[in-house]
Every structure is written in structure tokens, then in C-alpha cells.
Amino acid sequence: MQRVVVLGGGVGGTLVANLIARKLRKPIAAGTAAVTVIDSTGRHAYQPGYMYIAMGHERPEHLVRPEKGLLDHNVNLVVDDAVRIDAEARAVELTSGERLRYDQLVIATGSRIVPEEIEHFGDEAHDFYTAEASARLRAALDTFAGGRIVIGIAGIPYKCPPAPLEVAFLVEAELRARGLRDRTEITFLSPINRAFTIESVSDMATPILAAKGIRLELLAGIARIDPDRKVAITDAFEEHPYDLLIVVPPHKGAQVLIDSGLAPKSGWLPTDRHTLQVKAIAKPASGVADRDVPRHSNVYALGDATDLPVSKAGSTAHFEAPIVAERVAAAVLGRAPRAKHGSYSGRVMCFFEVGDGKGTLLRFDYDHPPRPPKPGHLWHLGKVMFNRTYWHTVPRGRI
Ligand SMILES: Cc1cc2nc3c(=O)[nH]c(=O)nc-3n(C[C@H](O)[C@H](O)[C@H](O)COP(=O)(O)OP(=O)(O)OC[C@H]3O[C@@H](n4cnc5c(N)ncnc54)[C@H](O)[C@@H]3O)c2cc1C
């Protein structure tokens, strides 16, 4: 019996488990292979919808579904927390004390937000990275009557890189529509030396910020919050007074990966950029070239969990899943991976809201930076359609 275990039932885990189950239909039917997803909650959240809760266009109950209903009937689901991965013994330990043995392991544990790393975050800052936080931000926007809004980022990497800029554009448009814009100063604090990590996207977004009168401050990652003086303090010790503070919280990889010695303190899994195999943690002083860092031949990662230089986005997991599924199925079936899905190219695709019912599209890979088209209504509608059809498409492997 060949056991495939997928850790995490989010976008990446669900899709990859479904694709693997399809490829292994015959051995599963014959009882010689099994695919199991382990997930903490057994509930699948569509996180991109959180931003729309904050904007007043979405309801939390629309964004969660039972994981079981999204999985192929050939995939088993175990609802529990993995507390340790023993890569030597090829087993995952759960809080229940159960040990699940595997022959092939796929890690799709996503990212976790750690707002507690910034003192006073919980009392002072708003964010839109959970349904609850987004509802609180909505309530704060509803009572906002003008003043200083500061939108910033507390550490890179974070999920959905365009999201804070999108929120800046959407909040600006809303306040204009509510007649509050001339009573409001909006400041966007970028932690790097431009508005967005990728230059071509920064070149697109910077004039839009200027046209909308949103002040852009560079090299201004949020490091501290002073609740008494109501100022956000950047890592360059600049102070930005606020009446409403919106901050992308710090992010880390799953604790289980750190505790298992598979990931460094950041929690991001060292991952081969093409095969998506998990690599040993390279010792910074060892001087070993990347190609010589040992790979775990039967452990793969996808989605937010990796340390790859691509966006932490559902679409990244979406494009990575066919590669992991093909490699895992090939290992189970004892054949070579087929060339078509043998290697990940760094492909990502994200819609990007710019406000006033307009959007654009970021499409890129390791070798081709995005060339966002002129913002228009079509791309905004594309995002609306994608959000509406998600439950029937991505996790089930239908697009
Ligand atoms: C506000 C917001 C807007 C976004 N907008 C977009 C967008 O427009 N486009 C886009 O492509 N992406 C967007 N994203 C990002 C996208 O949601 C994530 O990148 C995507 O969900 C990552 O998929 P994943 O499978 O890696 O992790 P997740 O979908 O987060 O799933 C991880 C799963 O692992 C489980 N898990 C974790 N640890 C354990 C453990 N120890 N034991 C068992 N189970 C565990 C969790 O319960 C969870 O179900 C957005 C995210 C947010 C928050």
C-alpha cells in the first residue's frame, strides 16, 4: 500500500489531493494506494473574500465550506492538528497521539499571521486577514467621519502582495463616494523602496496613488505602534499619526514545520523552485551551492508554506499543484514524471483592484515580470467572477 498524505486542506492541499486521487484512481480502487488530507479545522476558507467583508460587499458565511465536500470521494480527511513531522520515520504525529505513516508527503500548511509580534496591534490596528478582523474594519469604516488613515505593512513576505494597495484604492474610492475624501488624509507606507515589490507593478501603481491623492512613504515598514500618541512608528523611526490604522500583520510559516526541524524560525520551507521538493535547511556558513543542498525525495511543498520568491497567493498554489500531483503520482506508480507537468515555472496570476469598479491583471513567472494592462472594468469583473465561481473551480481542479 502506497500512502500519500497531504498536510493542509486549503487551496493548495485540496487541489493537489484531488489531482493526485484522479491520477491514482486505479491503485486506489485496487486498494494499493490511499490519499489522506489532514486539516486542523475541516473547514475550507476562501480568504480573498475577507477584503470584501471589509469593503462591505461580502458576508463571512459565504466564505467557508466543509472541506469534505470539496474533496474527491477517493480522498480521506482527518481533522486534527499535525504537531510533528518525522521525515526519517516518514510519519506525521497528530494532537490525538495518532501517527500517520506516509510514503509521499505534501505540505500545504499555508501561512499564519502573528499580529502579537507588534505590541498593541490587537487594540490599535485594523486588518483584513481574518473574517473577524475584516468585520471590525468594516465597522470602523462605517463610523469614520474623516481624519488620518494610515495603511501599512508589518513585514515581508505576506499573503496576497497587492492586497494593501487594493485596500488603499478601495477605501479612497469609498470615502470619495461618501463625501469624506476632502476631510481625510490617506498615507500608504511601503516597507521597501517602491510602492510594490515588482518594479513593473510599482510603476503602474505609483501614478494611481498620486492621482488619488494617497501619500506614498517608502522604506516605511511598520515596526511599532504608540497607542497613547496614536502614531505608527516605522523601522526607520519615522512617526505617522493616525485616526484609523490598517496594517498587514506579520506572517510566518506553520509552527509544526519549525518544531519538526524542516523550516527555520521564519517557518518558510526551503523548497526546490522547479521540482517543489522540500530541501534540507542550508547552513548559511556552509557555502553549499543550492543545487547541492539535499532534497527530501518524497516530501513536497506548495502554496504559502514555501520559501520560493513568488507571491503568497492562491493562484501560486493553483499553478504549483499539477507539478506536485504529477511527481507524487509518478513516484507511486513507479514511472518518470511526465514532462508537461514536471517543473514549476514560477507562474502566478492575480487580479488587482484599483477602485471605482476598475482593476488590472498581474501575470508572471520566474523569467517574465508582469506587464499589467491599463486598468479597466473588465479586470474588476474578472475578479468578481473568479470569486463567485471559486467553489466550483479551483479546489476541484476544474480550471
Ligand atoms: C485578504 C486576503 C486576500 C487575498 N487575495 C488573494 C487574491 O486575490 N488572489 C490570490 O491568488 N490569493 C489571495 N490571497 C492569498 C490566498 O488566500 C493564500 O495565498 C492561499 O490560501 C494559500 O493557499 P495554501 O493552500 O498555501 O494555504 P491555506 O489556503 O491558508 O491553507 C492552509 C491549510 O493548512 C491547515 N493547517 C495549517 N497548519 C496545520 C497543521 N499543523 N495541521 C493540520 N492542518 C494545518 C489550515 O487549517 C489550512 O486549512 C488572499 C489572502 C488574504 C488573507
Image (cartoon, rainbow, N blue to C red):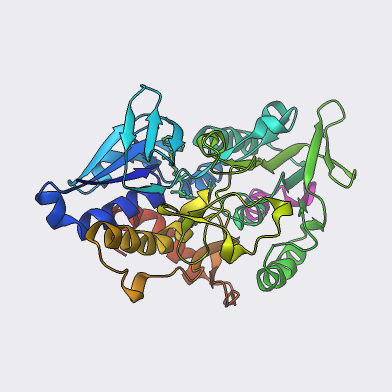
Residue situated furthest left in the rendering: 30
**Residue 358 in the image, given as x and y percentages of width and height:** 55, 66
**Residue 302 in the image, given as x and y percentages of width and height:** 45, 54
**Residue 378 in the image, given as x and y percentages of width and height:** 47, 71
> Which of the 4 image quarters holds residue 261?
top right
Quadrant in the picture for the N terminus: top left
Q: Is residue 357 visible?
A: no
In this image, 357 relative to 70: left or right? right
- Of residues 259 and 113, the one drawn nearer to the viewer in this rendering: 259
> Which of the 4 image quarters holds residue 387?
bottom left
Magenta segment: does it hold 20? no
Q: Which residue is depicted at the point 78% across and 43% down?
A: 222
**Residue 56 in the image, given as x and y percentages of width and height:** 52, 43
Quadrant in the picture for the C terminus: bottom left
In this image, 316 relative to 267: left or right? left
- Of residues 172 and 17, the one drawn nearer to the viewer in this rendering: 17
- Of residues 315 and 174, the one drawn nearer to the viewer in this rendering: 315
In this image, 137 relative to 244: left or right? left
Q: Which residue is depicted at the point 43% across and 59% down?
A: 384
Q: Which residue is depicted at the point 27% across and 56% down?
A: 20
- Look at the image and give the residue range highlighted in magenta: 171-187
Q: Is residue 247 visible?
A: yes
